[in-house]
């Protein structure tokens, strides 16, 4: 026992991993990168109207406090001293938009989640104002004009929520993505909380110039955003402030990265051309492109990868973003009820080992990379009377893999050098059928670290390496070797291509389902804009769901 305790007595670093579906706090040994303990709390998502996705910022904050307290209790049970935790990093769902009152600390509206579609008409209006020969938004931000990013969510709040308008007029409003809300709250809130963000999160707002690394006045004027409500932009690795309450009071918060950048760091993709794919609520493929800002010609984003210190250089990444991955499994569980737990999908898929010609395009929030097609909606096609819930479960897993194939193909075309293997991480990588399917559909090996918590690890590395903390070395010679699990393709290339071609055919059928902007209220006339196929597919899905919920074979 004494030897075990001694092995973990070195400096420890904690990481808040605040995702779309859950919050976690994890503690790592800074010398070995070993995960010592963690706690997780699920977060509710609210869907007040068609296409709207919201979360309660106070619930998110409370979940962070709960995870920290519970993890510290578990460390105590392991005879690990809490004072050994020398720093805390924050990793967060990106783009999700919060506005709060700096005098009361109260949110002025729910957090508008990155998946939210309410701003489609806002996007269309702004699109008309961008000259065809001068897309200054994309050239400055690396981003297409889309409902995905924070600027249009913030514009909607300013246009539609009187409490927000009044607070801005009176100089009480603060804006931030989830990282800003958490850091401000954890460092004191109304009692001197630090209002900041890091370059990776700022680069997802559509208000940030990724060349100058500053908020851009032209962009703020274009979207009508008052610059005084924006957080200060800092590097991804420096001391922002100290924890002001709880078991870790006085510990510096010294790392901050958007979740996908954190995973890139956690996978140690520090060299040009190194890439990782994270399977979470969505699916995100990032490739480190070094210190030069390169723009995609194939539907990918250019984004800030990381800046690991105030005086350190900024690195950029090409990113392929897929909106729905793990969220599809949750939809099968919560909306159709064909599985009781997320883990069950692997068992169902294993029973049949094929989708039997069934294809699932989960365009619940339109299509992201490489299409950027907001008119798309989810479809299941290729159904027959033989199709059952097992085939649909298999098709859902295949859909995640096909979407990854599309963004990997785009990445290979942009970079010119095809990836020879894919590094993966995220909760869904525990599903071995999914990982094997991914290798088969990409027709390259898929490599998974034995410790899959790379997002939290990246945040911890940034925090531990910060100036003034210095307990985690990012020198390549000092980084711990990581044990990997490898999945090799097990089908022939021809079969892989045939399945992919059928998927592409299904994707084309998903486009154009929404031909008018859904109304603000429940106007039944919106259904007149949907093709008959929508009702046929929907009815068949409900029929299959009903049969299997009731146990009818």
Image: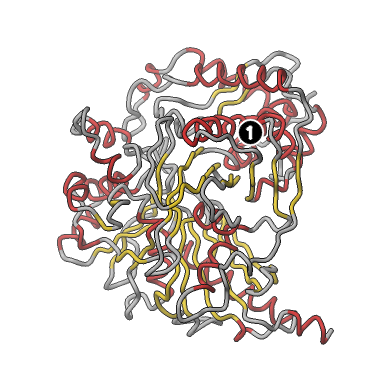
Q: Identify the residue at image location x=44%, y=36%.
A: 300
In this figure, what is the number of numbered marks?
1
* Above or below 164: residue 132: above
> Quick one: SS at disc 1?
helix
Q: Which residue is mark 1?
A: 401
Near-viewer residue (284 or 18): 284
- Residue 478 horizontal/vertical position (percent): 63, 69
Q: Position of residue 35 (x, y in %)?
A: 69, 68
Q: Quadrant of the C terminus?
A: top right
Q: Is residue 65 above or below residue 415?
A: below
Identity of the residue furthest to the right in this view: 1
Q: Compared to 352, does 191 lie above or below?
A: below
Left or right: where 91 falls relative to 218: right
For the point 20% across and 50% down, which residue is it? 220
Crowding at mark 1 (Cα within 10 Å: few <14, some 14-19, many 20+): many
In this rendering, would 121 be left or right of 27?
left
Where in the figure is residue 26, as x and y percent of width and height?
62, 68
Q: How is the image coloured?
A: secondary structure
Q: Quadrant of the N terminus?
A: bottom right
**Does residue 359 appear to the left or right of 131 in the view shown?**
right
Q: Residue at x 58, y 39 (%)?
A: 325
Q: Position of residue 23 (x, y in %)?
A: 56, 60
Tell me where residue 310 sits by quadrant: bottom left
Identify whether 30 is placed above or below 129: below
In depth, the one of 455 and 48 nearer the eye is 455
Say which of 166 and 228 sits in front.
Answer: 228
């Amino acid at each position: 026992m004494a030897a075990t305790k001694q092995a973990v007595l070195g400096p420890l670093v904690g990481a808040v991993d605040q995702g779309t579906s859950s919050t976690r706090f994890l503690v790592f040994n800074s010398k070995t990168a070993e995960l010592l303990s963690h706690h997780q709390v699920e977060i509710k998502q609210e869907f007040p109207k068609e296409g709207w996705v919201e979360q309660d910022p106070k619930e998110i904050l409370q979940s962070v406090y709960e995870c920290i307290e519970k993890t510290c209790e578990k460390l105590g049970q392991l005879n690990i001293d809490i004072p050994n935790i020398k720093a805390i990093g924050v990793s967060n769902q990106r783009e999700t938009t919060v506005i709060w009152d700096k005098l009361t600390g109260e949110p002025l509206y729910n957090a508008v989640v990155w998946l939210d579609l309410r701003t489609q008409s806002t996007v269309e209006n702004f699109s008309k104002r961008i000259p065809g020969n001068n897309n200054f938004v994309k050239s400055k931000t690396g981003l297409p004009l889309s409902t995905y990013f924070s600027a249009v969510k913030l514009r909607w709040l300013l246009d539609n929520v009187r409490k927000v308008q009044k607070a801005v007029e009176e100089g009480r409003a603060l804006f931030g993505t989830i990282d800003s809300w958490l850091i401000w709250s954890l460092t004191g809130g109304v009692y001197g909380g630090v209002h900041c963000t890091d370059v990776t999160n700022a680069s997802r707002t559509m208000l940030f110039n990724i060349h100058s690394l500053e908020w851009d006045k032209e962009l703020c004027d274009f979207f009508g955003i008052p610059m005084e409500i924006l957080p200060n932009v800092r590097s991804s690795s420096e001391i922002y402030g100290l924890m002001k309450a709880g078991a870790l009071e006085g510990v510096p918060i010294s790392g901050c990265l958007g979740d996908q950048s954190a995973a890139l760091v956690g996978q140690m993709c520090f060299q040009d051309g190194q890439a990782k794919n994270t399977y979470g609520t969505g699916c995100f493929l990032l490739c480190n492109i070094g210190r030069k800002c390169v723009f995609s010609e194939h539907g990918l984003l250019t984004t800030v990868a990381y800046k690991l210190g105030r005086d350190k250089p900024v690195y950029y990444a090409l990113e392929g973003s897929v909106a729905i991955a793990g969220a599809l499994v949750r939809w099968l569980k919560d909306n159709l009820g064909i599985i009781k737990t997320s883990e069950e999908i692997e068992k169902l898929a294993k029973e049949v080992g094929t989708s039997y010609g069934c294809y699932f395009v989960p365009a619940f929030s339109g299509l992201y990379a490489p299409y950027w097609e907001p008119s798309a909606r989810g479809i299941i096609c290729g159904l027959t009377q033989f199709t059952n819930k097992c085939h649909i479960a298999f098709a859902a897993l295949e859909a995640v893999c096909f979407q990854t194939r599309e963004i990997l193909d785009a990445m290979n075309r942009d970079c010119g050098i095809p990836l020879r293997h894919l590094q993966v991480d995220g909760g869904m990588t525990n599903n071995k059928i999914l990982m094997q399917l991914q290798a088969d559909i990409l027709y390259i090996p898929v490599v998974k670290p034995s410790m899959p918590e790379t997002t939290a690890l990246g945040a911890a590395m940034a925090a531990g390496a910060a100036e003034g903390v210095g307990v985690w070395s990012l020198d390549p010679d000092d980084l711990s070797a990581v044990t990997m699990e490898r999945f090799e393709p097990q089908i022939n290339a021809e079969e892989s291509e045939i399945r992919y071609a059928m998927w592409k055919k299904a994707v084309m059928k998903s486009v154009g389902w929404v031909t008018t902007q859904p109304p603000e209220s429940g106007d039944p006339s919106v259904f007149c804009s949907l093709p008959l196929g929508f009702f046929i597919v929907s009815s068949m899905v409900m029929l299959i769901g009903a049969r299997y919920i009731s146990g009818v074979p």
